[in-house]
Image (tube, rainbow, N blue to C red):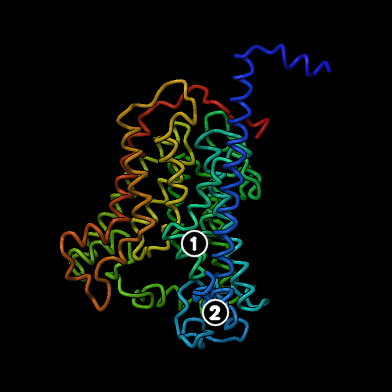
């Protein structure tokens, strides 16, 4: 009765305010349920296969290569000869360092279908982890808020071209990204996206597990070695040394267990680019691929590629230093990721899974009201970020390199429009680099809403 009386004496304005708050809460919860269902359906399709169009579970050829390479190691064979026939009869080469083959022996202890399903589930969970981790640093928010904020991006991100292809092939790209971002950003708890900082926005100084982990990932696939630039940009020479030690120790294990294969890899296989396909193929979305298509295959394109790669290391190294000084370590780490994509001799389209955490930074700038900054962002910067967000969604969903001629050397005869469309990943990333440079010049707000402190992180 008292409750009823209390309700009736509430003023109309107060009732309207309460009603609006409840409606907003219900709306947020309703949308959260919608996105959770969307994520569950998307994940189920990727894990189990599209009904009526794929096997259940789908056959993932790259996972089969990893597993077969691991089996060859256990059988005492030569992992760098053409592998035994895969499940569907293909004969493909193994292109990873020997330490990777040793790790891939773990895949042989479960059936192919079970292993590829577990890989897909781990990749989906890993992508969510990366989004939450980057969001905590970028928006300076709690883990719970970051999970809610990134849920739609994860549900939609599973259908972005590079992620879609990674899951379809059973590639390890996302898991490598997890190891890198956890090592660079997650502090003392890699299994928990803490987002703890040292008070200046940078990851709190912790044990050396992080750089050691990045070193291990670099030994599995050499491209992540460029993330040593992150430590150098922050003048974290201890971290750089630990990363180097992690790489050397992991590679040393490969030499100790597989000495013959290690010598063959580092003296012959690593230099045999034809093992992984023609560098001018349309899906090679890095500087080298762009130049091999634009200039033509040969030493001229290779020389320009080397020069551009060195320039990108210098420019992005300075940018990473500026972002770190501005208290934006996640942005600095993602800037360095651009080096791995630009400078690698082969950057297949599915290597661009980094686009999903890139989107966190773009949306942070494009939607400043989500942060309630003390100082408003420059309007031109916000507009530029919004244009970049829309363009990125279209480009990375459509994977334009499949829309232009791409078989039997057709890339050598592309028109100007074909080059623009077929190199869209690289062109978008250059525009993203401009955004990061612009963003680095904007002072960080004194106290964004939802700030995470070491005490509550």
Q: Rounded to the nearest whole Å, what is the CA distance between mark 2 and mark 1?
A: 17 Å
Vertical arrangement, residue 432 with respect to residue 101, above or below? above
**Residue 355 on image: x %, y %:** 42, 52
Q: Viewed as shown, does residue 299 lie left or right of 273?
A: left
Instruction: Give residue 278's quadrant in the image.
Output: bottom left
Say which residue label 1 marks.
Answer: 173
Element carrying mark 2: helix
Vertical arrangement, residue 396 with respect to residue 46, above or below? above
Task: Name the foreground residue: 290 vs 403.
Answer: 403
Element carrying mark 1: helix
Residue shown at 62%/32% (left/top)?
25
Say which residue label 2 marks.
Answer: 69
Vertical arrangement, residue 91 with respect to residue 67, above or below? below
**Residue 450 on image: x %, y %:** 58, 28
Quadrant housing the N terminus? top right
**Residue 128 on image: x %, y %:** 57, 51
Residue shown at 59%/69% (left/top)?
48
Front: mark 2 or 1:
1
**Residue 24 on image: x %, y %:** 58, 31
């Amino acid at each position: 009765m008292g409750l009823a009386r209390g309700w009736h004496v509430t003023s109309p304005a107060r009732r309207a305010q309460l009603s609006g708050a409840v409606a907003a809460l219900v709306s947020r919860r309703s949308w959260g349920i919608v996105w959770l269902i969307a994520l569950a359906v998307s994940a189920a399709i990727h894990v189990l296969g599209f009904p009526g169009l794929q096997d259940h579970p789908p056959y993932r050829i790259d996972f089969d290569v990893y597993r077969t390479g691991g089996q060859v190691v256990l059988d005492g064979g030569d992992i760098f000869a053409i592998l035994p026939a895969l499940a569907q009869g293909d004969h493909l080469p193994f292109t990873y360092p020997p330490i990777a083959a040793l790790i891939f022996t773990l895949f042989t202890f479960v059936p192919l279908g079970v292993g590829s399903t577990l890989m897909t589930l781990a990749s989906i969970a890993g992508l969510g982890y990366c989004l939450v981790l980057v969001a905590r640093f970028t928006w300076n928010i709690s883990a719970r808020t970051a999970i809610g904020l990134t849920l739609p991006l994860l549900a939609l991100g599973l259908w972005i071209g590079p992620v879609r292809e990674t899951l379809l092939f059973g590639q390890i790209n996302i898991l490598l990204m997890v190891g890198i971002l956890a090592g660079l950003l997650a502090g003392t708890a890699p299994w928990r996206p803490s987002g703890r900082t040292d008070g200046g926005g940078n990851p709190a100084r912790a044990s050396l597990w992080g750089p050691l982990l990045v070193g291990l990932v670099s030994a599995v696939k050499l491209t992540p070695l460029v993330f040593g630039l992150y430590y150098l940009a922050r003048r974290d020479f201890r971290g750089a040394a630990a990363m180097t030690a992690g790489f050397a120790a992991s590679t040393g294990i490969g030499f100790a267990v597989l000495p013959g294969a290690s010598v063959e890899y580092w003296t012959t296989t690593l230099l045999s680019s034809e093992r992984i396909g023609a560098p001018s193929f349309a899906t090679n979305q890095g500087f080298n691929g762009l130049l091999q298509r634009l200039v033509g295959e040969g030493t001229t394109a290779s020389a320009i590629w080397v020069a551009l790669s060195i320039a990108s290391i210098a420019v992005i190294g300075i940018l990473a230093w500026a972002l770190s000084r501005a208290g934006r370590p996640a942005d600095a780490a993602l800037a360095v990721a651009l080096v791995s994509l630009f400078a690698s001799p082969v950057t297949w389209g599915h290597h661009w899974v980094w686009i999903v955490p890139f989107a966190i930074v773009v949306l942070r700038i494009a939607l400043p009201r989500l942060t309630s900054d003390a100082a408003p962002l420059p309007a031109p910067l916000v507009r530029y970020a919004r244009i970049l967000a829309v363009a990125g969604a279209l480009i990375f969903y459509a994977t334009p390199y499949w829309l232009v001629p791409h078989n039997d050397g057709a890339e050598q005869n592309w028109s100007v429009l074909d080059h623009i469309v077929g190199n869209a990943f690289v062109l978008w990333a250059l525009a993203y680099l401009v955004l990061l440079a612009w963003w680095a010049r904007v002072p960080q707000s004194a106290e964004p809403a939802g700030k995470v402190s070491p005490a509550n992180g």
